[in-house]
Image: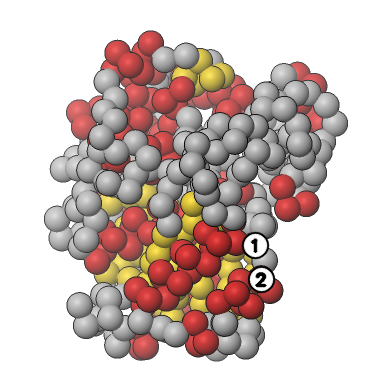
Amino acid sequence: MLDGFKDRTAIVGIGQTRFGGHPPGRPPEHPVESGKELACRAVLAALEDAGIDPGEVDALASYTLEETDEVELAAALGLGDLTWFSRTGYGGGGSCATVAQLAAAIAAGQATVGVAWRSRRRGPRGRPWQAPGAAAEPRPGPAQPRQGGERQPVAAQWTRPFGLLRPADEVAMLTRRYLHEYGATRDHLFNVALACRNRANQNPAAIMYERPLTREMYMDARWISEPLCLYDNCLDTDGALACVVVGAERARDCPRRPVLVHAATQSLPPLHHGMVDYWCEDPLASPGWTAAHTLWKNADLTPEEIDCAQMADAFTPQVLFTLEAYGFCGRGEGGAFTEGGALELGGRLPVNTGGGGLSEGYLHGFNHITEAVRQLRGDSTAQVPGASSALVTAGECVPTSALILRAGEGGRR
């Protein structure tokens, strides 16, 4: 991102539906809306929050995983003439890119009002790495189409035959090496899970609201893929989130305090493979390292000036990797950084203050964006006093993206 892009756009509205979930392959515990209905509700809520009529929307951005397409959304909500739309790939790695690409389009004059969203209604179809209609448990075999027609990464041919069937398996093997290389422990992973759960217990919208976590519960939990236990994994969630992006000048007249898009980036290092790259020279140097280099280079802020961080947490070790990649601590020091309540409210770097993917809900990281906006407006359920800057990171280990957001001036309330 060039200097001419910096702070030229702002997030002026956010919206979400209720979060829920049910085991894949089983009927829902409660009747739920379709993915399209969820998307529409979240987008309308975000536009109402922004004080903008749907007819003014001329740009859309979402994920390649998204099953509600632009045509459906525009027709259902009565959006205006769309002059720009895009989708970003790589699952949770694309979350911040949705906002970054809208911001780029608006700054370049290709659009004036953009909406980014992610809706998720898993239903009984099973998991993305399974064939449609497959049983709940993953099974080995050739690559299958993902939901929405996206295919498994090519690298899967080198991992599936050896039992690495799920993202949890791939990250677990990387985590084992990390623990071996740097002496990090499960207590460090627990510190991440606990910080997220503590914040979720302050957030009535979180799936894990009023469900405390103890160290005993964590250590006694069943393995999902050793060394990752149940509480090291994010929550599969049905629901939807959205945000509205406009130019910074217009943002000052919107109802809510604008949140400026200060810096943004996407990252795909040379020769990177799929979910986890075991074949590169340094598997522990993820795409997050490349993203961080570009992000800080284009920002006026340093890691020491960030008030809170909303970090990709599909799995607890990703927070340790992100702390190192974005320069909050040195290489191999991510585990030690979490000690002494550093990630908690009042700690060195409050992280995932809405509960994150581990305890609020997992919609491929989009809730990290909306929580950062709440922090910078000053209305989070776990507010960091005086927060004026936030880092948001997308999925770690995959081709990724990131944002630095700042509190802006203006807004009528």
In the figure, residue 170 lies in which quadrant? top right
Q: Residue at x 55, y 38 (%)?
A: 28
The secondary element bearing badge 2 is classed as helix
Any part of residue 210 in sight: yes
Tag 2 residue: 72
Q: Residue at x 25, y 34 (%)?
A: 210
Amino acid at circle 1: Thr
Amino acid at circle 2: Glu
Tag 1 residue: 68
Q: In this rendering, is residue 2 above or below 295?
A: below
Q: In this rendering, is residue 390 above or below 318?
A: below
Give me the disc on residue 407.
none
Q: Residue at x 24, y 56 (%)?
A: 380
404 vs 166, left or right, is left
- Quarter holding the C terminus is bottom left
Q: Residue at x 61, y 44 (%)?
A: 122
Q: Residue furthest right?
A: 142
| Camera-side residue of 73 and 185 | 73
Q: Are marks 1 and 2 in contact (CB under 8 Å)?
A: yes
Any part of residue 336 in sight: no
Q: In this rendering, is residue 66 above or below 153?
A: below
Q: Is the residue marked by circle 2 packed among few (<14), some (14-19), or many (20+) residues within 10 Å?
A: few
Distance between the Cα atoms at labels 1 and 2?
6 Å
136 vs 263, left or right, is right
| Camera-side residue of 310 and 3 | 310
Residue 355 % position (x, y) = 33, 42
